[in-house]
Image: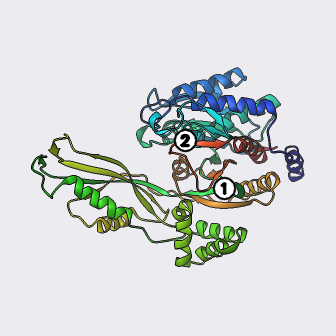
């Protein structure tokens, strides 16, 4: 009977996948407000967003005891809201982060902290990562409150700080350590996977079960320096430049996990032509096919191997002096079963310069994969098929990292579910002119609303 009720409810939006106009307007308003708060993890603050969200829930009639605002430091506030259900089952935790990667106005076509709708897209830092999901979670719970929805379990919303920066101010880690009772749940729904567009066509809708490890390496060269009028070959910048060039031409070997093998098997069945054959070849361990797929798509390449890439530089102390220091940050995304000591050893060998010291500056470590819960996967598959017939639902591994790592390690299985579709080979999160398709934002709003109801319906 519950399954039949779910089908009836879903049929109401099957025609255009759009939420009611008033719900779209509310979600857009919240989205705009969030994007226009400068919440860069280094220079910004999440506190205004947390306080604004708390005010919305208070105005909607939520009890003050069900709303928490706090964080490791004053400018790194998180907000946690509990939507009370009957308590028949354990809570679901709905997570999104409200900090963003830094963005400089001179790098962007438009102001990154001005929410802009243009040519079918929403532009602004955080439109994809992760303020779309944050806004939709808020709009979803407010809608349920107005509708008088009574779930059979509490729904806990946690909008968190410093996901992009990690470290001592990370919101999920801080909540787990200081206020675990606020976010204790049977499982969590977070970012970590999304729908994929290829040539404008929806081809797959991913649900994240695991993610890569995150680590930073420091490549550093020091020497005595000297006067720039008397240059010598032993230049710290030249040593570093040579090391980085060799790193740029180095690649780790291919390796599939059980999750990525299943992913490529399924995608091989959905594609056509030579690319479909190559995807099937990847799943079968064909290295030539792996090389072709890796060359064709950066995201698919990252699913097949550990990657390390230079992201920041520093060096020199004066324009008229030989450098005494040259250094670079190298960000590594390790496959879940890879080993950082092995990675460091391979990079040290590849750069082939004993003047370049390689050290680990950050190692977040591995996290376990989330189990294949039947209820979560059935709801995900069913709503995907209803909204987007023919689009395949695929369990996958996130090539980036998320707060799901902290939750999985703490024993709260976490699933990457968003309902937003992006171009597989034009991912702008963390980059210039970040954007979200307007239609995808609203369709994701519908998907997440129905998904949460499917997992909490009495």
Res 293 → quadrant: bottom right
Measured along the vertical axis of the image, is residue 274 above or below residue 117? below
Quarter holding the C terminus is top right
The location of residue 1, given as percent across then percent down, is 90, 52
Res. 354 image quadrant: bottom left
Q: Residue at x 29, y 45 (%)?
A: 314
For residue 408, side relative to residue 438 (left or right)? left
Q: Position of residue 162 (x, y in %)?
A: 48, 38
Depth order, front residue of 213/32 = 32
Q: Provide residue 306's location: percent of width, then percent of height.
A: 46, 64
Crowdedness near tag 1: few (<14), some (14–19) or many (≥20) residues, C-alpha within 10 Å? many
Badge 2 or badge 1: first in the primary sequence: 1
Query: In the rendered image, is residue 182 in sight?
Result: no
Identify the mark at residue 196; answer none if there is no mark: 1
**Residue at image point 12% right, 52% down:** 231
Binning the other alpha carbons within 10 Å of mark 2 as few (below 14), some (14 to 19) or many (20 upward) gives some
Residue under numbered circle 2:
433
Task: Work out whether residue 3 or residue 231 is closer to the camera in this orientation and state it.
Answer: 231
């Amino acid at each position: 009977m519950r399954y039949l009720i779910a089908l009836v409810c879903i049929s109401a939006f099957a025609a255009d996948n759009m939420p009611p106009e008033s719900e779209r307007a509310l979600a857009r308003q919240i989205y705009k407000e969030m994007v226009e708060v400068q919440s860069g993890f280094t220079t910004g603050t999440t506190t205004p967003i947390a306080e604004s969200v708390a005010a919305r829930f208070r105005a909607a009639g939520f009890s003050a005891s069900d709303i928490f605002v706090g964080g490791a430091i004053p400018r790194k506030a998180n907000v946690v809201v509990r939507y009370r259900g009957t308590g028949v089952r354990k809570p679901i935790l709905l997570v999104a982060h409200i900090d963003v990667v830094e963005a400089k106005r001179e790098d962007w076509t438009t102001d990154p902290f001005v929410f802009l709708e243009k040519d079918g897209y929403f532009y602004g830092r955080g439109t994809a990562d992760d303020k779309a999901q944050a806004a939709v979670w808020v709009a979803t719970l407010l809608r349920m409150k107005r509708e008088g929805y009574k779930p059979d379990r509490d729904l806990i919303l946690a909008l968190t700080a410093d996901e992009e920066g990690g470290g001592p101010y990370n919101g999920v880690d801080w909540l787990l350590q200081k206020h675990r009772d606020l976010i204790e749940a049977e499982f969590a729904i977070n970012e970590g996977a999304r729908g994929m567009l290829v040539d404008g066509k929806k081809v797959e809708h991913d649900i994240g079960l695991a993610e890569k490890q995150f680590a930073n390496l420091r490549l550093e060269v020091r020497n005595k320096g000297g006067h720039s009028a008397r240059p010598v070959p032993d230049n710290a910048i030249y040593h570093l430049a040579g090391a980085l060039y060799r790193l740029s031409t180095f690649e780790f070997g291919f390796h599939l996990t059980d999750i990525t093998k299943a992913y490529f098997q399924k995608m091989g069945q959905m594609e056509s032509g030579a690319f479909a054959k190559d995807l099937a070849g990847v799943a079968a361990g064909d290295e030539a096919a792996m090389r072709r797929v890796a060359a064709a798509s950066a995201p698919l390449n990252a699913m097949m191997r550990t990657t390390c890439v230079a992201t920041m530089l520093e060096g020199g102390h004066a324009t008229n002096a030989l450098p005494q220091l040259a250094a670079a940050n190298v960000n590594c995304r390790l496959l879940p079963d890879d080993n950082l000591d092995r990675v460091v050893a391979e990079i040290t060998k590849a750069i082939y310069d004993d003047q370049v010291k390689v050290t680990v500056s950050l190692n977040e470590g591995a996290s376990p994969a989330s189990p294949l819960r039947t209820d979560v996967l059935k709801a995900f598959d069913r709503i995907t098929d209803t909204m987007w017939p023919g689009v395949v639902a695929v369990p996958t591994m996130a090539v980036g990292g998320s707060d799901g790592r902290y939750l999985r390690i703490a024993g709260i299985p976490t699933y990457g579910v968003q309902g937003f579709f992006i171009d597989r080979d034009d991912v702008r999160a963390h980059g210039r002119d970040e954007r979200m398709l307007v239609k995808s934002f609203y369709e994701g709003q519908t998907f997440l609303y129905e998904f949460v109801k499917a997992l909490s319906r009495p």
